[in-house]
Amino acid sequence: MSDQNNFITHYSQLEGSIRSLMVGLFSGTCSMCTACCCRADICEEAIQSAFLSLLLEKQGLSEDKMDEKYGWLDLHGCSLQYGRPPICYTYYCDELLVRLPNDETQFAAKVLGNLIQHIGEQALGDWHLVEIRNSKDLVKLDYPTLFQRLEESTAALQVIQTFLESGRLTKADYEILNIIPIEEP
């Protein structure tokens, strides 16, 4: 399996796990929202990005299946299992964060939202993985670094999953989570 295919497989699995965890954390709030931040213009990045386009193809999706007004949204939220732009994970409205029970949970949620962003940073020079528009540039990616960040994000996800079950973060957990920079959109 090529580096690109191997990376896509592991990335899509990780993103699917992140998505599931976020749905569990926030679906109650997001499902009641009438001023949703999800818009077709944000969804267009999934089509414009060479990498995200590959993930859409893997799901059997293409531009012609995206709604002009609502993007990938359907009655249950975003219909993408993976291949969302990082902003879909990093952005939290104030309502989401205030509903979380404490500072540790808010911190864990912010790290969770930045895992996808972390993986793709400087994938090709200063370009984030999703900013690459030409599919021919995907063979030029620094796959060893991308795989390292994928492993870091996977480790952080495991810590967050355990924390959400136990309610405790250890010093070692914080060391793993602090590897992931928290960027505010």
Image (tube, grey):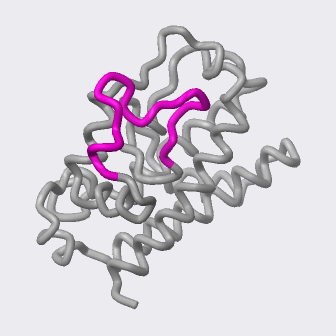
Residue 146 % position (x, y): 36, 70
Position of residue 174 relative to residue 150, above or below, is above
| Residue found 67% across the figure and 19% down from its top | 29
Residue 121 seen in the current view: no
Residue 4 % position (x, y): 33, 78
Query: Among all residues in the image, which is located at the extreme front?
Result: 64
| Residue found 31% across the figure and 63% down from its top | 54
Is residue 44 magenta-colored? Answer: no
Residue 99 seen in the current view: yes
Instruction: Judge by depth and name the residue closer to the eye, 180 or 86.
Output: 86
Position of residue 177 relative to residue 13, above or below, is above
Q: Which residues are magenta?
A: 62-80
Is residue 76 magenta-colored? Answer: yes
Which quarter of the rendering shows the C terminus? top left
Secondary structure mostly seen in magenta is loop
| Residue found 74% across the figure and 52% down from its top | 161
Q: Name the side, left or right, on which 103 lies relative to 76.
A: right
Instruction: Judge by depth and name the residue closer to the eye, 182 or 12.
Output: 12
Residue 164 % position (x, y): 79, 44
Residue 145 % position (x, y): 34, 73
Position of residue 95 relative to residue 132, above or below, is above
| Residue found 85% across the figure and 42% down from its top | 167
